[in-house]
Image (spheres, grey):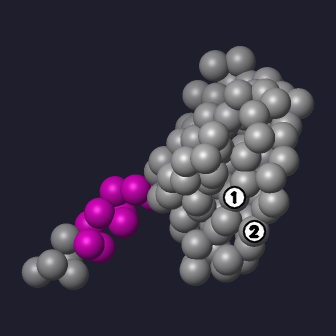
């Protein structure tokens, strides 16, 4: 029974990329794209010139900002202010995510 609940939870988290992109455009984001990384990919500390939103479509990613690390899973959204120093690492299954910039 526990496995059935887990499968239902995953199905409920399936995301429609078009709907997400449309919502982000309504929020004023104009540069949108999907990116995918393999397992355990690490991005060293860096910044972006633009404000960005990352929506996890599949897998997981841990982001470290201001000395605090948080893991984002399928369906989660991480908003990054322009210029903030951060690093990231994908999970054991990799990560597919929608990125939007404004």
Figure check: 94 above or below 22? below
| Residue ID at (73%, 54%) | 87
Asked which quadrant contains residue 83, the reply is top right
| Residue ID at (26%, 67%) | 8
Question: Going by the image, does 15 lie left or right of 79?
Answer: left
- Mark 2 element type: strand
Figure check: 22 above or below 41? above
Q: Is residue 11 magenta?
A: yes
x, y percent for residue 67: 61, 47
Q: Which mark is residue 42?
A: 2
| Residue ID at (67%, 65%) | 89
Question: Going by the image, does 84 lie left or right of 26?
Answer: right
x, y percent for residue 43: 79, 62
Q: Which mark is residue 88?
A: 1
Asked which quadrant contains residue 12, the reply is bottom left
From mark 2 to mark 1, how far is it between C-alphas?
A: 6 Å
């Amino acid at each position: 029974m526990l496995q059935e609940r887990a499968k239902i939870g995953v199905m409920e988290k399936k995301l429609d990329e078009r709907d997400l992109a449309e919502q982000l455009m309504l929020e004023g984001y104009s540069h949108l794209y999907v990116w995918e990384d393999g397992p355990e990919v690490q991005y060293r500390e860096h910044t972006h010139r633009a404000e960005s939103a990352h929506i996890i479509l599949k897998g997981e990613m841990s982001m470290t900002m201001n000395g605090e690390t948080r893991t984002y899973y399928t369906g989660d959204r991480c908003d990054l202010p322009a210029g903030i120093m951060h690093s990231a690492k994908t999970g054991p299954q990799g990560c597919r995510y929608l990125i939007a910039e404004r």
